């Protein structure tokens, strides 16, 4: 079974193609992405209207590249999956409309799927089927969530989420404070390698006993970095950028991994999947490996290319949905900025 996936939830236009083998494993045939990140850089964040227009311009060329990379035509695929939500309304509409057009033109069934579940499904491309129960830590520019996964197409329960800034959003804001380019994740990660993560004791949000055990908060951390920098600038002292970056990054990775390990233990699961754009962060991966090894938990992190938004993860989720026997989406399928995690719910 060959499934084509279309992703347009934010600022990347992704088209991926996977083949689902008889044993349930997935083979990646194509993964093409067109990013509009450079068009948003001067604004310090994604501008929805710019993203929507970029998707309109990139959709057809990205589709063509994906089909060429797979060495096939649209008529060869068995089904088309598309991100129906959550995400930016206008961006989602472009993807859903395009998917409907491609499905109608080729006579293939269409499946609207969830972007967040897609991030979890991306790992199945690299590491094979998920165990019957696992925990997923989803960290990106718009999401920081802990998900109890009892089947990609059956039951995914949110057990923790951010109450303010997502981890990736905090990276972007701190990067701006430090004069680093957007998006902030890669430059902070690179700079942090030159600094001391213990140099500054930045706060760990929502870690007290009275706090929600699995929720996240990074707004206070972002503010603490801003105040620390302002205080030292006022004295005329040179800002140790590498130490600030390393200490900030350590605070983020510490909270994310500590809560993930605690959640895995309390829910009696022995596999942790980390996905989303921030999953590509080197310190997060390093600390997660250390803590998972100590706790006897199997850690799965897709390669960086599969962590960020892409069409391959939507194709992967689509393949699982089709294999589950779910009915195709109706012609009235609409973009839903708050689409539930469970397919068909």
Image (tube, rainbow, N blue to C red):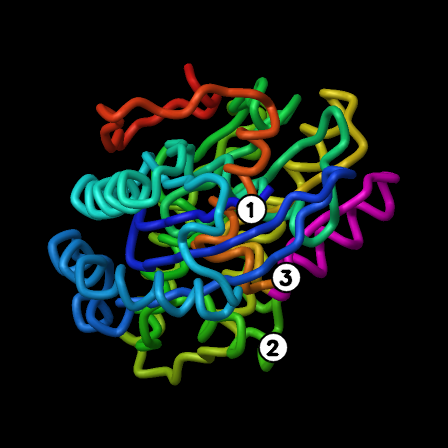
Q: In the figure, 214 relative to 100: above or below?
A: above
* Dot in front, 3 or 2: 3
* Mark 1 vs 2, N-terminal side: 1
Q: Quick check: can you spot residue 249? A: yes
Which residue position holds label 1? 2
* Dot in front, 1 or 2: 1
Label 2 element class: loop
Residue positioned 46% across, 48% down in the render: 4
Quadrant for the C terminus, please.
Answer: top left
Residue positioned 20% across, 41% down in the render: 93
Indicate the position of residue 40 as horizontal and vertical percent values: 21, 67
Which residue position holds label 2? 193
* Dot in front, 1 or 3: 1
* Mark 3 vs 2, N-terminal side: 2
Q: In the figure, 227 relative to 75: above or below?
A: below
Comparing 95 with 159, the one in front is 95
Comparing 266 with 123, the one in front is 123
Q: Quick check: can you spot residue 229? A: no
Which residue position holds label 3? 303
Label 1 element class: strand
Q: How crowded is mark 2: few (under 14 residues within 10 Å), some or many (20 or more)?
A: some
Q: Residue 131 vs residue 293: left or right?
A: left
Label 3 element class: loop
User: Residue 29's image quarter?
Assistant: bottom right
Residue 299 is a magenta residue: yes
Q: What stretch is highlighted in magenta?
A: 282-302
Residue positioned 59% across, 33% down in the render: 320
User: Residue 45's image quarter?
Assistant: bottom left
Indicate the position of residue 178 as horizontal and vertical percent values: 35, 73
């Amino acid at each position: 079974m060959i499934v084509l996936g279309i992703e347009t939830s934010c600022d990347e236009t992704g088209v991926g193609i996977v083949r689902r083998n008889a044993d349930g494993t997935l083979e990646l045939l194509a993964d093409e992405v067109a990013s509009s990140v450079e068009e948003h850089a001067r604004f310090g964040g994604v501008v929805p209207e710019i993203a929507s227009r970029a998707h309109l311009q990139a959709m057809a060329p990205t589709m063509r590249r994906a089909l060429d990379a797979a060495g096939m035509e649209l008529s060869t695929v068995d089904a088309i999956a598309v991100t129906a939500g959550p995400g930016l309304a206008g961006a989602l509409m472009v993807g859903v409309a395009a998917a409907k057009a491609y499905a109608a033109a080729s006579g293939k069934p269409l499946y609207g799927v969830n972007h967040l579940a897609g991030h979890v499904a991306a790992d199945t491309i690299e590491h094979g089927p998920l165990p019957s129960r696992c925990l997923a830590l989803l960290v990106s520019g718009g999401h920081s969530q802990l998900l109890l996964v009892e089947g990609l197409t059956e039951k995914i329960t949110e057990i923790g989420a951010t109450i303010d800034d997502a981890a990736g959003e905090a990276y972007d804001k701190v990067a701006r404070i430090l004069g680093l380019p957007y998006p902030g994740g890669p430059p902070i990660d690179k700079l942090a390698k030159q600094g001391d993560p213990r140099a500054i004791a930045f706060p760990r949000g929502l870690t007290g006993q009275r706090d929600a055990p699995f929720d996240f908060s990074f707004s206070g951390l972002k503010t603490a970095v801003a105040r620390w920098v302002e205080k030292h600038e006022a004295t005329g002292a040179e800002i140790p950028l590498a130490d600030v970056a390393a200490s900030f990054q350590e605070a983020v990775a510490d909270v994310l991994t500590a809560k993930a390990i605690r959640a895995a233990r309390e829910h009696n699961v022995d596999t942790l999947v980390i996905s989303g754009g921030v999953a590509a962060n080197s310190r997060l991966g390093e600390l997660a490996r250390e803590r998972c090894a100590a706790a006897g938990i199997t850690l799965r992190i897709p390669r960086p290319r599969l962590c960020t938004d892409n069409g391959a993860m939507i194709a992967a989720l689509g393949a699982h949905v089709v294999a589950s026997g779910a009915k195709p989406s109706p012609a009235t399928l609409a973009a839903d900025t708050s689409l539930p995690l469970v397919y068909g719910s």
